Image: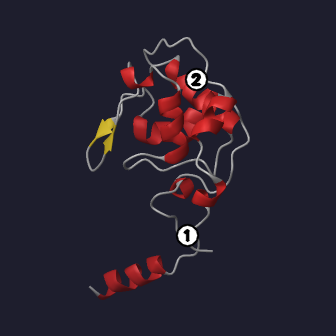
Amino acid sequence: MQKFALMMIALACLPNAARADSADAITKNKLTTTDGRVLYQTLCQGCHMADARGAEGVAHFPSLSENPKLASGSYPAYVVANGFGGMPWFADKLSDNQIAAIVNYVRTHFGNHYTDVLKPSDVAKVRPSAESIKPIFD
């Protein structure tokens, strides 16, 4: 019991704790690639799985495979930028080009066949304002 208490104190003292509603729990540094496949593999497949079929267990990670909610590119762009439910937001980690690349990749793979292309300018329309993505604590 004493070891458990010491471990909990040590964990509480770790620097740079991630906010539960941010992408910091996944990636601390901004990525520079605009390759949708690489971005998906780096940021998304840990929860949505390599085949994009999602997962159930302690949490619910929805399937992106053959998903009709991806018919409009604006919806997944909004979710990636702003987060939704238990999904963290990536607006402070990814550029409009990167978000568009991820969304376009998912919308054209995993049994999805949406042919219209989401543009970075479309992502900018759903991106949260700079004031709303500032850290709560400095």
Q: Is residue 8 visible?
A: yes
Colour mapping: secondary structure
Q: Position of residue 93 (x, y in %)?
A: 64, 49
Q: Amino acid at mark 2?
A: Asn
Residue receiving disc 1: 136
Which residue has dot 2 on it?
104
Mark 1–mark 2 CB contact (< 8 Å)? no
In this rendering, position of residue 38 left or right of residue 5: right
- Quadrant occupied by the N terminus: bottom left
Sequence order check, earlier mark of 1 and 2: 2
Q: Residue at 47% across / 50% down in the picture?
A: 88
Query: Measured from the top left, where is residue 33 in percent x and y?
Result: 72, 36
Q: Which mark is residue 11?
A: none
Image quarter for residue 67? top left
Q: Is residue 54 above or below residue 32?
A: above
The residue at the point 37 percent across, 20 percent down is 68
- In what element is the residue under mark 2? helix
Instruction: Name the quadrant of the C terminus.
Output: bottom right
Q: Residues within 10 Å of mark 2 (few under 14, many from 20)?
A: many
Label 1: how many Cα within 10 Å (few below 14, some 14–19, many 20+)? few
Residue 113 lies, in percent from the top left, at 48, 11
Which three-letter amino acid code belongs to the residue tagged 1?
A: Ile
The residue drawn where x is 68% and y is 31% is: 121
Q: Nearer the viewer, mark 1 or mark 2?
A: 1
**Camera sees residue 67:** no
**Quadrant of the rendered image containing residue 105:** top right
Residue 24 image point, x, y percent: 56, 57
| Residue 131 versus residue 122 in the image, above or below | below
